[in-house]
Amino acid sequence: MRPLSLGPAGAGCYLFPTLAGYLLVDTGCERTAEELLRQLSRRIGLSELQWIFLTHAHADHAGGLEGLLKGTRARVLLHPLGLERLRSGKDPGLGRAPGRWESLVGGLTHLLGRETAAFPPLSRGMENRCIPLEGMRRRELESSLGVRFLDTPGHTADSMSLLTEDGTLFCGDAAMSGPLIRRHRPVSVESLEDCRESWKVLRQSGGRMLYPGHGKPFPLRRLELDQI
């Protein structure tokens, strides 16, 4: 499978068909939601989008959620902790750089104005379309969609990844790629220890190609050569 990358460059949103309809990984930020809806309309038709999977509730990954929900009938799959973060409409600001290089990159991003911590809070009327991934419901969804959900905290406490049957692995910001990224490390983490453990989960997942929230896809075997 080759998922379709949608949204403006760098949005990190991916569309692919599951056994139970089309699924969109992440929604990008608030200002790109209209463009994402236009692209979805051209590609599959808005009525065909059944699911939105959030890798984590940061503004650049979940900021467009409210707009997407208003334009589609999709249901939202997310970590149980993600719902409270969506209600707040802001990143918790708990992250720190895992190294000096990442600290420099994070500072540069902030100076260039490419980072915003605020996004539209999830309205109460939309909460009934959110499905926290836990317990029996999580296992039922894995079976009906033909995917596997992985808990990959570290970048945030609510970070999750999604693995398809053919080895395509969407990891959000658990790992990154790009010209300013070294050794695929995320620019910030809430817990470095959790991030290390999540890399072990990714390495042992059986995935083949990793699709990060920032940067181009890369073979999972490259992650096995790195140390966070």
Image: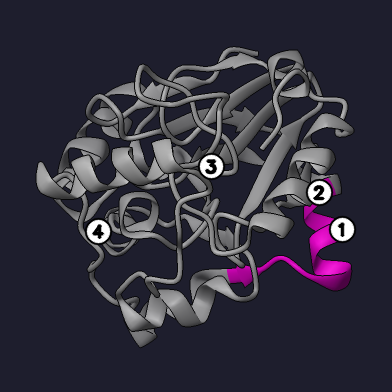
Q: State yes or no: discs 2 and 4 in contact (Cβ < 8 Å).
A: no
Magenta part of the chain = 131-142
Q: Tell me the quarter of the picture where residue 71 sits.
A: bottom left
Q: State yes or no: discs 2 and 1 in contact (Cβ < 8 Å).
A: yes
SS type, badge 1:
helix
Residue 147 visible, this angle = no
Q: Position of residue 14 (x, y in %)?
A: 47, 30
Q: Label for residue 67?
A: 4
Up-down relation of residue 13 to residue 50 (above or below): above
Query: So how many labels did they put on this image?
Result: 4
Look at mark 2 in the image and give the residue it sits on. Answer: 142
SS type, badge 3:
strand
Main SS category, magenta section: helix
In 3D space, how far apart are the residues under numbered discs 3 and 1 (Cα atoms)? 21 Å
Look at mark 1 in the image and give the residue it sits on. Answer: 139
In 3D space, how far apart are the residues under numbered discs 2 and 3 (Cα atoms)? 18 Å
The amino acid type of the residue labelled 2 equals: Glu
Depth order, front residue of 198/71:
198
Is 134 included in the stretch rendered in magenta? yes
Horizontal placement of 225 versus 31: left or right? right
